[in-house]
Image: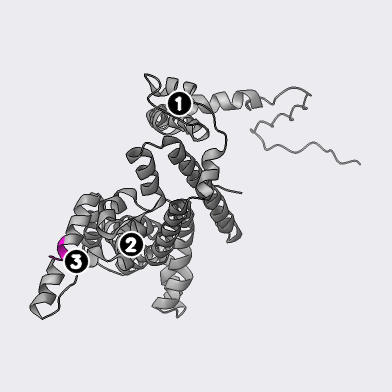
Amino acid sequence: MSHSTVPRVAPGAAADPPPLPAVPGKTPKGRAPGGANWRHRLRRDRTLLLMTLPALLLLLVFAYLPLLGNVVAFQDYDPYVADNAWQAMAQSPWVGLEQFSRMVGDRLFWQALQNTLAIFLIQLTLFFPVPIALALFINSFVRPRVRAVAQAILYLPHFFSWVLVVTIFQQMFGGAGLVAQTLRQHGYEGFDLMTEPALFKFLITFEMIWKDAGWGVIVFLAALAAVNPEMYEAAAMDGAGRWRRMWHITLPALRPVAALLLVLQVGNALTVGFEQILLQRTAVGPTAAEVLDTYVWNVGIQYGDFSYAAAVGIVKGVFGLLLVLAANKVAHLMGEQGVYKR
């Protein structure tokens, strides 16, 4: 007696119909074809796309359209030969790579590049670890109210302008500041940290730490808030102390965010605070305070050499892009996502 291959069906239950055979060129019912898939997502996310449209328009108008002006780096641009900038670009003569060749032999350019890289390395060494350390310290507070007050105090200077920040440091560490007056009362004369060229790079780094470390603290605390508290409890039950819990739970939770912020900061290696340095450049002199951004402003705006300033800006942008790609590659090798996935 042969056994039937038809599955048994419980009494009162309807048997499922057998699946239809696939037909070449046809799409199974209920599944959108590949060509209509993007239209489905467009209808589904149209509200979000409309919300991002103003930001995209602002980015296009104020970030990407001005890139067309970089064509003057290959010209001997004269803004006064026509009534507007576009006509002036059309009438200015082409000089090819002459501006870039001039850059190679420019001693002031190399001095500005050297100062820029030195300030970046100091800020990377002294500034970057501070938000992580402060976030770990604040996260150790048990009382939420104390933690909230600490976050508010640290985050408040982020909203100050650089004019106010430099003024506060001048009143504290300048020649007529609080520290100088206190030292003068005890017989020490000549203290003026704000006009010391040798300490200028460290000065602007500490100004940056005081102003912007609170923003990094908020970012790292948000990453710590996503850590499951049960992981700390399980580690404590297994005998792990505070330092071992920090090493094996807290720091791995901060590593993806730290890698992303590090890649972004490396990308801004040649942008080290134009307004901050411009406000203090006169006090210490251009030898100590001239960076690429102030050099471009000085050459292009003050002296009207727009073509050469544009060439320096292009080199700065290309070098920054290469740094982002290199730092992102390092983040991938460390197992982190970075700015984009592999």
Q: Left of 322 or right of it: where is 279? A: left
Would you name the residue on which mark 3 appears? 173
10 Å neighbourhood of mark 3: few (<14), some, or many (≥20)?
A: many
Q: Left of 202 or right of it: where is 156? A: left
Farthest residue to the left: give it.
185
Disc 3, disc 1: CB below 8 Å? Answer: no
Secondary structure beneath label 1:
helix
Farthest residue to the right: give it.
1
10 Å neighbourhood of mark 2: few (<14), some, or many (≥20)?
A: many
Would you name the residue on which mark 2 appears? 205
Residue 236: image x %, image y %?
A: 42, 76
Mark 2 or 1: the one toward you? 2
Residue 197 covered by magenta stretch: no
Which residue shows up at 31% across the image and 67% down it? 199
Q: Left of 207 or right of it: where is 333? A: right
Disc 2, disc 1: CB below 8 Å? Answer: no
Above or below, 28 against 114 in this view is above
Query: Whole-Å distance between the Cαs marked 3 and 1?
Result: 54 Å
Which residue shows up at 55% across the image and 32% down it? 95
Q: Left of 210 or right of it: where is 118? A: right
Would you name the residue on which mark 1 appears? 46
10 Å neighbourhood of mark 1: few (<14), some, or many (≥20)?
A: few
N-terminal label among 2 and 3 = 3
* Amino acid bearing label 1: Arg
**Span colored in magenta:** 171-176
